[in-house]
Amino acid sequence: MQQIATNVLRTRPRFTIEEHMHSSRGIPIFICAIGDQADRPEFDALRIQARKQGGWYSRPWKSMPGGFAFKNRAAAERFAEPAGPDDKEETDTAPEPVPSISTKLRGLADEMECEIEASLAERSTNTPMQRFYAALAWIHGNRLLRTQAALRALADAHIAKTVPTELADIARKSQVYDRLGTLFDRSSAGYYDVGFDTGAPQCDDPAARALWRLIGTEDSIDPSTELKQDGISTSADRASEDPVGVRGCAG
């Protein structure tokens, strides 16, 4: 597999770099669009290389082409530049070193981009049931955003050697996600509504409190405002039955 990846990178196809706006974040991204359909070994090798350089694979969406996305043009240009004939992969002769915890956490955060984009993508809201599931996806997407921010902040804390004692054993995405949910008020719930997000943390153990402090509270706005702007209802008791809407503290 290593030899295949090396050969693919040395014969890397030419990319067209296009600037687009991230569909859910509203930030500019630079996509190295894939001109021809790559076979599986080529695609896997390119995706691994993109992740190493801080990018991710972005699926085609409306006017945006499919390709490898980066947050700035310089990074996209570095990725699109073909590897020279004299470039050597150190891993050809030595096993890859075990990544540090900070590298692992940042990698977990970067790998969440596609899931976040899918959760926050536009959805049909023509029926009450569609609005219900669109709201659940929106809630899930914003919880993923908090999780991603916490993973990156924790990675930085490891580098700075300022990791809170309560978070010293955090090494998985689920350990963070399970602790960053918010409580919903369903006292006036309708059948296909998700409830009112109080913004209060759902989990109240020491690690959860440390994670909320790590990411700050400036982003804990009332999500019902944006949901209403999208035509999505904001109160229901059935949301508690959905595994995406409510999860307990991690063990």
Image: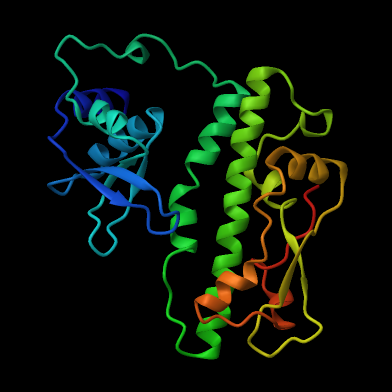
Among the 4 quarters of the image, the one containing residue 65:
bottom left
Image height of 165 relative to 36, above or below: above
Q: Which color scheme did the rendering employ for the protein? A: rainbow
Q: Position of residue 176 (x, y in %)?
A: 69, 45
Among the 4 quarters of the image, the one containing residue 121:
bottom left
| Residue for point 16% across, 15% down | 84
Image height of 63 relative to 211, above or below: below
Quadrant location, the N terminus: top left
Furthest toward the right, the residue is 205
Image height of 5 relative to 116, above or below: above
- Is 69 in front, or is 8? 69
Looking at the image, residue 236 sits to the left or right of residue 120; the answer is right
| Residue for point 68% across, 49% down | 218
- Is 74 in front, or is 45? 74
- Is 129 in front, or is 48? 129
Number of numbered discs visible in the structure rendering: 0
Image height of 178 relative to 53, above or below: below
Q: Position of residue 171 (x, y in %)?
A: 67, 34
Q: Position of residue 240 (x, y in %)?
A: 74, 75
Looking at the image, residue 8 sits to the left or right of residue 154; the answer is left
- Is 99 in front, or is 130? 130
Looking at the image, residue 93 sits to the left or right of residue 11; the answer is right
| Residue for point 62% across, 29% down | 155
Q: Position of residue 162 (x, y in %)?
A: 74, 22
| Residue for point 60% across, 42% down | 149
